[in-house]
Image (tube, rainbow, N blue to C red):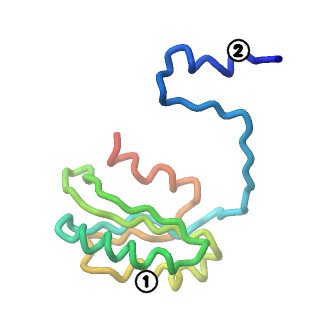
């Protein structure tokens, strides 16, 4: 048997929580350069209702929408709940496609707008130093 010892380094002290990836396949899809995305922030006292709204509506969205939701503390210390809708399709269709996710409750801020796709990964940088 021909073994590559480097593949088994985790066994020598990795405990029971490790994995070894020997093959990774993926497909790329064209995106951007600009997308429609950003945070919609809600007061923490709306968290339960907002998360229920999210749960009830996320399954009925287009496959060109990626979303995240959760709780965070803003850079100025305000605890909030958020939806981060991201439209990856043609920009002219984005506002209509995101309308349902943007229709919940009384938000603190709706920052959704056109941005470069490359800016998306840094949206949480100031909230998670």
The residue tagged 1 is 100
Furthest-front residue in this view: 1
Q: Residues within 10 Å of mark 2 (few under 14, many from 20)?
A: few
At 53% from the left and 82% from the top, the residue drawn is 97
Measured as percent of width and height from the top left, residue 88 is found at: 60, 68
**Vertical placement of residue 103 versus 124, above or below:** below
Measured as percent of width and height from the top left, residue 1 is found at: 82, 17
Q: Quadrant of the C terminus?
A: top left
The residue tagged 2 is 5
Whether residue 58 sits left or right of residue 10 in the image: it is left
At 40% from the left and 50% from the top, the residue drawn is 124
Foreground residue, 102 or 70? 70
At 51% from the left and 56% from the top, the residue drawn is 120
Query: In which image quadrant can residue 112 be found?
Result: bottom left
Q: CA distance from mark 1 to mark 2?
A: 52 Å
Furthest-bottom residue in this view: 96
Query: In which image quadrant can residue 28 be found?
Result: bottom right
Foreground residue, 59 or 125? 59
């Amino acid at each position: 048997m021909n073994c590559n010892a480097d593949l088994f380094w985790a066994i020598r002290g990795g405990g029971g929580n490790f994995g070894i990836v020997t093959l990774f396949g993926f497909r790329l899809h064209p995106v951007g350069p600009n997308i429609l995305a950003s945070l919609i922030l809600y007061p923490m006292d709306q968290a339960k209702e907002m998360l229920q709204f999210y749960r009830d509506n996320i399954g009925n969205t287009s496959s060109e929408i990626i979303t995240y939701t959760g709780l965070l503390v803003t850079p100025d210390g305000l605890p909030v709940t958020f939806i981060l809708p991201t439209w990856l399709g043609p920009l002219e269709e984005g506002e209509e496609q995101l309308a349902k996710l943007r229709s919940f409750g009384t938000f603190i801020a709706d920052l959704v707008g056109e941005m470069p796709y490359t800016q998306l990964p840094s949206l949480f940088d100031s909230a998670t130093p």
